[in-house]
Amino acid sequence: MFSWLSRDENGKQDLFENVTEGLKKIYKAKLLPLEQHYQFHDFHSPQLDDPDFDAKPMILLVGQYSTGKTTFIKYLLERDFPGIRIGPEPTTDRFIAVMYDEKEGVIPGNALVVDPNKQFRPLSKFGNAFLNRFQCSTVASPVLKGISIVDTPGILSGEKQRVDRGYDFTGVLEWFAERVDRIILLFDAHKLDISDEFRRSIEALRGHDDKIRIVLNKADMIDHQQLMRVYGALMWSLGKVLQTPEVARVYIGSFWDQPLRYDVNRRLFEDEEQDLFRDMQSLPRNAALRKLNDLIKRARLAKVKNDVHAYIISALRKDMPSMFGKDSKKKELIKNLGQIYDQIQREQQISPGDFPDLRKMQECLMHHDFSKFNPIKIKLLEVVDKMLAEDIAKLMAMIPHEEVTAMSEPLIKGGAFEGVEDQISPFGYKRGEGIDAGAGEPEWIVNKDRYKYDSIFETLGPTDGKITGAAAKSEMIKSKLPNSMLGKIWKLSDIDKDGLLDPDEFALAMHLINVKLEGYDLPAELPDHLIPPSKRDI
């Protein structure tokens, strides 16, 4: 068991068996007192409980109506789940947390937020209007043993739909975004549009850019020329909404179990699906690192909020010796909060990205009594600084060990993820293609073009049935592959390692060159089915 020891101020030893247990202890002992002192939970994020640290990795699906969010979940699970509704109209009218349980069913929102074993208790602050639109669907799917998935209502166009929700939709999204491991934004390739509410929803996810992945779904509904134009339009639209210089990663595909309408891009869809699924499969392995990263962000935000409160309190005490004019001074401070941010940034050397959103902070301050702000406590800040400098560093040292342990455990299994590592059926990813072509066949795959390779071999002047490396090089460089790759092909082809190539070895070399020219990777070791029959006893 990998662990580390630390001593608190009283000399007591803490034994942290794993990263999750360590995060729980340092949060409660060192960060939570600072949050409570400066009312962090009223301004930003509710208090974290044990289920927040213990929860499985969670994926949040966000998109406009009829972009395929619910169908995407069905595709992953390869089955329906309780409460599923799919259709071309806006069908999903609620937040649905799809989680694992041997007993399948639906748990209503009001019951869900009082369950001490679930991480949804803070959602009660959004009221009954939201809780009536929130449920948990429990499914006995092997996929959900590794992850949980949150389906969201389709985002509509127009102000009426936004107002009539009856609850703070973007606020709920922000709550989930802070706690999930991955946020998948889905777009419909043949109905590309970013409504005002969708724009606001994406803006609510700002600050969690590292969690966001973008999926251009239903890409089989358009041909290759239209797909190119839609992809360009999507990137242009995202550039205006995300407001980041980095290019977002977009996965293109058709995530359902129906025939492809245009299958000219089948290979592209398969490659993109594999990339997306592998990214999702990495979530359980990286869960501890994600929780550690989120706690660091939370600690930095709490420290900045302390500086903002401390500045406001000092301004009140300096400029308001009496109780008169208090409200006008409060409004003035809130109006000039941007200048306060600038001053704190200069004095404390804090990055602009660490500050809470200016508009939201101003709205929160309007509803608080400044006189009830607690004075600054240097000791609380010193404890958090020490936590970031020492405790977090020690937990970081445990991450590689936990990742190695996770590597030995199975990734997400079942459902559509079975196809990621499918080595049994002929329909596995790249089965029967490239280097895998000919596997399981009685005939050596190289013999299919053997007549061409043998004729070339004879023109190279073989001696005693073999050609020299120089002779082989003169032919192999015609492929225009780099010397490093040709050297690898030579090593794979020279089975008997005598520095010469016989007809079988030369034919194998030419076959490997063609495999590489077709865009496939070459292995470090030659697969058994590519070894020439005459060499299989060597």
Image: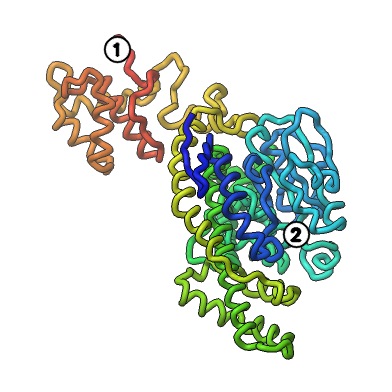
Q: Quadrant of residue 444?
A: top left
Q: Secondary structure at mark 2?
A: loop
Q: How much space separates mark 1 and mark 2, taking CA atoms?
A: 64 Å
Q: Which mark is residue 155?
A: 2
Residue 36 locus on image (x, y percent): 66, 60
Near-viewer residue (226 or 427): 427
Up-down: is 230 above or below 221? below
Residue 117 locus on image (x, y percent): 74, 39
Q: How many marks?
A: 2
Q: Secondary structure at mark 1?
A: helix
Q: Residue at x 76, y 61 (%)?
A: 169
Residue denoted by label 1: 534
Going by the numbered disc 2, the residue's amino acid type is Ile
Residue 53 locus on image (x, y percent): 63, 44
Q: Earlier in the sequence, mark 1 or mark 2?
A: 2
Up-down: is 286 above or below 326? above
- Name the image colouring: rainbow
Is 473 left, or right, of 515 in this rendering?
left
Toward the front, the furthest residue is 10
Verify CB contact (< 8 Å) between mark 1 and mark 2. Answer: no
